Image (cartoon, helix red, strand yellow):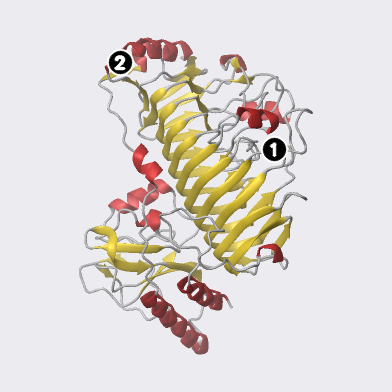
């Protein structure tokens, strides 16, 4: 059934549609110069469009379209990211504090042929707008400070093309030496503003190569970097110190196709060029148990600062697609990541023991978790003690039939904290939001906020797995229990959800302060929740959650984590709005 978006038309200046009565909709609404209606109801289709399509829509004046998106002349540049069930504030010069538009995504049953239900729908809509009139929380949809600081990229005064070093873009010639020689040559410009290596249109077969500091690797629109299907073209390197061994096998691991270590100011970008790992051979070796070493990521940067990965398509990674590990100041933006649904362990983006990371405006469709935050494995991660922190995730669209949209762990022994994930659109997936851990991990996952999420056709909206298992060796400490606390999940709408949540902690190690609020799920199971060994709070959750998290969120309490620039966790306005939303579902 559809999701609808209600906007207060008197506030949305310049919007025009054919005359509509409350409870009716005009999906073809367009912006015009005539007076706005008193009420605008627009249809929001599912699945949501590709983020590049959203960017294209923003350039077409006046289109009312998208998954919780409202476009209009005054404030059309950021509505896609900041829409959903949150409060949007629009002033005369764009987003500000002068005027209020409230968008409530919810589900309406068809009522066109039933006069009684039609009258009821009209009354409910009127009630919602009474709520809008009284519910003006002083909150502005602001971009994450982490993302704001990372968006600027330097221009390189020097540039060379890969063909100048003998590369041939026929998809057959191996160009590893050409990439290595070009990058070696560009080292001489590191203290002169850096340099760019340009990859033009063509298919450029290569083995693994390493980047340098103050370098931009730029791919043209029709450029494709192809990973060699010969494993000897992917060197063996030492295991990560926070893992103690390869993730799949003891010993070393294959180096990623695009690699870098101890770098500063490195950019991988383009005009939507492609990096194709040709991972099918690696997936077959994994399934047939014929690997000798752990499979390589597609892109991995270690111990690096000032990393930008943007405007690319990354596909068919042998293993995890993007793996920044022990890094800081990382921006991953406008990236499409693709892999078949049956490709094993092809995570999309895995920030690992990294801090100050911004991931935004990405489309991910892979064979495992779309975005998963990690920080080391059991005793090695505990000893290395390098947490992941201050991570912002926003504007993500994707699906994974075998994984989760946003995940934490299971390798989290160095700790994970201060993570904000918002404006997430998931469809046709196994899990929506997932936490994975196990006795022996130690570490912590705390101070997490996941908000403004829409889910369509998801098997399980929320999953906490306290017995995930998988240990690097027999030397782990089974008494090293993880600490999971101050996890806030709020403002979630789900359609065709099989199960609301399976939340399993660890006996003797209760996971604390798990907070759910403003959540409406269209659940098909007769037993939507199952919980054990955890405790928390909830407000305005439908269907009603399990007993351990059924306590109401205390007014004015800080038990539920919230970032400073976000709105309060509970308020009378929130309660009234969600109560009315629940009535609509009856």
Q: Please name the residue that numbered disc 2 is placed on.
A: 191
**Residue 214: percent from the left, percent from the top?**
35, 21
Lateral position of residue 141 relative to residue 302, left or right: left
In the rendered image, residue 84, in percent from the top left (x then y), is placed at 44, 61
- Residue at x 38% of width, y 45% of height: 145
- Position of 225 relative to 549 (above/below): above
Judge from the rendering whether residue 29 lies leftward or rightward of residue 390; answer left or right.
left
Residue under the image location 61 percent in, 41 percent down? 368
Residue 82 is left or right of residue 519, and the answer is: left
- In the picture of the structure, the residue carrying the numbered disc 1 is 441
- Position of residue 53 measured from the top left corner of the image (x, y, whole percent): 39, 49
| Residue 349 seen in render | no
SS at mark 1? Answer: loop
In the rendered image, the quadrant that contains the N terminus is bottom right
Q: Is residue 158 above or below residue 491?
A: above
Q: Quadrant of the C terminus?
A: bottom right
């Amino acid at each position: 059934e559809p999701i609808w978006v209600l906007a207060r038309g008197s506030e949305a200046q310049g919007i025009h549609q054919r005359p509509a009565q409350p409870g009716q909709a005009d999906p073809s609404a367009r912006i015009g110069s005539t007076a706005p209606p008193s009420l605008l109801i627009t249809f929001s289709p599912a699945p949501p469009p590709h983020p590049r399509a959203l960017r294209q829509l923003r350039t077409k004046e006046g289109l009312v379209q998208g998954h919780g998106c409202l476009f209009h002349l005054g404030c059309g540049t950021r509505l896609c990211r900041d829409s959903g069930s949150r409060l949007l504030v629009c002033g005369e010069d764009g987003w500000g504090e002068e005027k209020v538009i409230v968008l409530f995504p919810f589900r309406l049953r068809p009522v066109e042929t039933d006069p009684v239900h039609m009258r009821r729908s009209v009354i409910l809509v009127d009630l919602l707008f009474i709520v809008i009139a009284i519910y003006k929380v002083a909150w502005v949809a602001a971009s994450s400070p982490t993302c704001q600081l990372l968006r600027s990229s330097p221009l390189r005064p020097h540039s060379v093309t890969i063909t100048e070093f003998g590369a041939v873009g026929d998809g057959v010639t191996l160009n590893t030496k050409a990439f290595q020689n070009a990058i070696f040559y560009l080292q001489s410009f590191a203290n002169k503003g850096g340099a760019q290596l340009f990859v033009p249109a063509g298919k450029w077969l290569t083995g693994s190569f390493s980047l340098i500091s103050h370098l931009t690797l730029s791919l043209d629109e029709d450029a494709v970097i192809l990973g060699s299907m010969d494993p000897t073209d992917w060197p063996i390197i030492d295991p990560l110190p926070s893992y103690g061994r390869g993730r799949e096998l003891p010993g070393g691991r294959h180096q990623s196709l695009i690699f870098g270590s101890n770098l500063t100011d490195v950019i991988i970008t383009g005009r939507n060029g492609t990096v194709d790992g040709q991972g099918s051979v690696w997936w077959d070796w994994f399934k047939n148990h014929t690997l000798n070493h752990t499979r390589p990521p597609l892109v991995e940067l270690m111990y690096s600062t000032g990393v930008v990965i943007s405007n690319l398509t990354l596909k068919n990674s042998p293993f995890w697609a993007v793996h920044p590990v022990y890094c800081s100041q990382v921006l991953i933006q406008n990236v499409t990541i693709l892999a078949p649904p049956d490709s094993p362990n092809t995570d999309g983006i895995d920030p690992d023991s990294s801090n100050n990371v911004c991931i935004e405006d990405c489309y991910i469709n892979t064979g495992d978790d779309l975005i998963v935050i990690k920080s080391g494995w059991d005793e090695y991660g505990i000893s290395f003690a390098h947490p992941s922190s201050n991570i912002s995730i926003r504007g993500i669209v994707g699906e994974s039939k075998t994984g989760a949209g946003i995940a934490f762990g299971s390798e989290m022994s160095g700790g994970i904290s201060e993570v904000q994930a918002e404006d997430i659109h998931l469809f046709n997936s196994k899990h929506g939001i997932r936490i994975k851990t196990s006795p022996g991990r130690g570490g912590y996952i705390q101070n997490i906020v996941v908000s403004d999420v829409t889910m369509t056709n998801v098997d399980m909206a929320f999953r906490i797995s306290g017995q995930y298992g998988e240990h690097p060796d027999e030397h782990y400490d089974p008494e090293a229990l993880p600490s999971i606390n101050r996890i806030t999940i709020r403002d979630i709408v789900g359609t065709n959800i099989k199960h609301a949540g399976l939340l399993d902690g660890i006996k003797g190690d209760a996971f604390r302060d798990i907070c759910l609020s403003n959540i409406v799920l269209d659940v098909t199971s007769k037993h939507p929740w199952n919980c054990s060994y955890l405790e928390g709070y909830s407000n305005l959750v439908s269907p009603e959650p399990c007993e351990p998290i059924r306590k109401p969120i205390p007014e004015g309490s800080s038990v539920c984590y919230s970032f400073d620039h976000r709105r309060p966790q509970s308020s009378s306005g929130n309660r009234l709005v969600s109560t009315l939303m629940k009535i609509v579902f009856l």
